[in-house]
Amino acid sequence: MSGEASTPGASPRAPRPGTQKSSGTVTKKGDRGAKEKQVLVLPPVGEEEPKNPEEYQCTGVLETDFAELCTRSGYTDFPKVVTRPRPHPAFVPSASMSEKPAQDDQRLSASCSLNSLESKYVFFRPTIQVELEPEDKGVKEIYIRGWRVEERILGIFSKCLPPLSQLQAINLWKVGLTDKTLSTFIALLPLCAPTLRKVSLEGNPLPEQSYHKLMAADSPIAHLSLRNNNIDDHGAQLLGQALSTLRSCNQTLVSLNLAFNHIGDAGAGYIADGLRLNRALLWLSLAHNRIQDQGALKLAEVLRPFELTHTEVVERRRLLLEKGTQERSRSPSSSRPGDSKTDREKNLLLQVNSAALTEKTDKTQTTKTPKGLSKKKEKSGGESVRKEEKSGSGQSPTQGTPKKEDPAKSGKGKVTIPEQKTSKGKGPKTGSKEKRSFLLESEQLVAEATETVNPLLEPVEHRNGKVFVPGNKVLLHLNLLRNRITEVGLEGFLATVQYQAQFSKSKSPSKGPVGLLRLSLAKNCFSPQCPAYTKIQELMLPRAPVTKAKPREEETT
């Protein structure tokens, strides 16, 4: 009996190595089972992974493309692409329904409970939820939540997401990202459509806290949400450096959500340092963190005139020197000898006049240019040219001819036109987009605006040997709900709000930013009846966009 009991136990083990042949039927089944398991688990299919997915041409339909690429990559069970469910409207039972007995409901109670249980399990099943455009049903947003996104899935996304021409947002909630998969995801973003501007990575804590890579200089992200990622002061330091440094500044990020993290006073100071020279961020949330008075005072300080450090003063002097040398090299009017100035002006006008005469497009322009030439040849000094510009006949050669279209049409390959563009402004993008003739005053305004993009080149104020810049007035929304700020921190924000309110009164609303429009400080460590808090609310009430819209609506009605 002992020998008979031992043989059936040994018979299923024998066929796996393939050396013994005890019962034939059992060995065949064992061989089949082993082969099937090897097809599913072992990676012979993975060897074909670089070949088969590349052969497939994506159609732009995410559901079919993702399914086909997953099957070609060896996946048998993969998430399905479904439309994101919308909240159901509130159901109001009618009187006729309330009067009828609920017999049908009692009959279908068992099936309804079964369906409800199945629907609950379906809700937690891994899916890729998409939000579609109402007109052409193109994918607008992607939501992935609650299942691990691996490296191979991101490789599939890198092939099926670029054909989505209307993709605007990607939301990843608790998908188990690592620092390696985050780098793969960041490399995927430039491949997508240029409409992709919003990325949400919530509930994905990383050991190295490399979220700042999403804010690189070439990143297309304009709206970034990093809630519930356990970001501490070290992560806030990396994010602050990504916002701005002396030599670099993020120009694309518009809103940053850092709520529900572990940022303290030191981290808030790093974020404030990033806001010193950043003039692109409009919306910042630091709610539900651990910021106390020191961090609040640092944040409030950069929103009003603040003192430049020694390194910032040195950098400012270097930028001023570069600006001066560029203006001297580009603009012919800034050259020292007066003879060379007049000679250059004569040569420019002669070339423009000859090109206009050869084309003969407009009689009026050709008749005006010789008058200006004769007058400019007679007078060589800079003051005489200014007098002629004030007269009616002298305005066309100095202001009109280099800006009208016929010199651009007549002599496209000549050197005169690019010299004028570079001498009058540093913003060739605006000129190429608009392609219109500007007045001299408007060109000077544009040049001044482009030159003062760097906050270190803004108009400064000297106090007791120290240099003060106006501060960050671009940030419009700051959320500090549920932190640990007391009345000491409130005093700093009160001084900031008072300064910005006076500044907005003295400045017209159409000229540049005016500072905060909304400041959220509730649920902190102070009383709601605190005098400083009530004063802040009184000053911020007329600045809020909602309160501004109400009087306009009343006027229109």
Image (tube, helix red, strand yellow):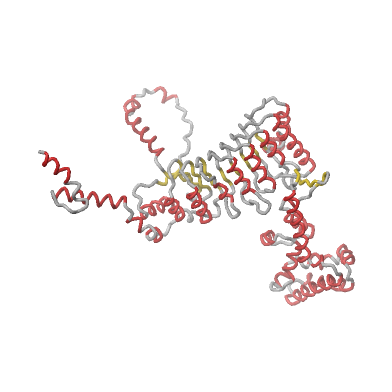
Q: Position of residue 482 (x, y in %)?
A: 61, 31
522 relative to 314, above or below = above
Residue 556 visible in the shown view = no
Task: Between residue 34 and residue 345, name the one nearer to us.
Answer: 34
Residue 492 sits in quarter? top right
Task: Between residue 153 and residue 378, name the one nearer to us.
Answer: 153
Q: Residue 540 vs residue 116: left or right?
A: right
| Residue found at x 49% / y 44% | 172
259 relative to 414, above or below = above
Q: Number of labelled discs?
A: 0
Task: Between residue 508 and residue 484, name the one nearer to us.
Answer: 484
Q: Residue 432 vs residue 89: left or right?
A: right
Residue 441 visible in the shown view = yes
Q: Residue 360 vs residue 239: left or right?
A: right
Q: Position of residue 79 (x, y in %)?
A: 39, 46
Q: Position of residue 451 (x, y in %)?
A: 74, 56
Residue, far left: 1
| Residue found at x 48% / y 46% | 178
Residue 435 sits in quarter? bottom right
Residue, far front: 2
Identify the image quadrant of the N terminus: top left
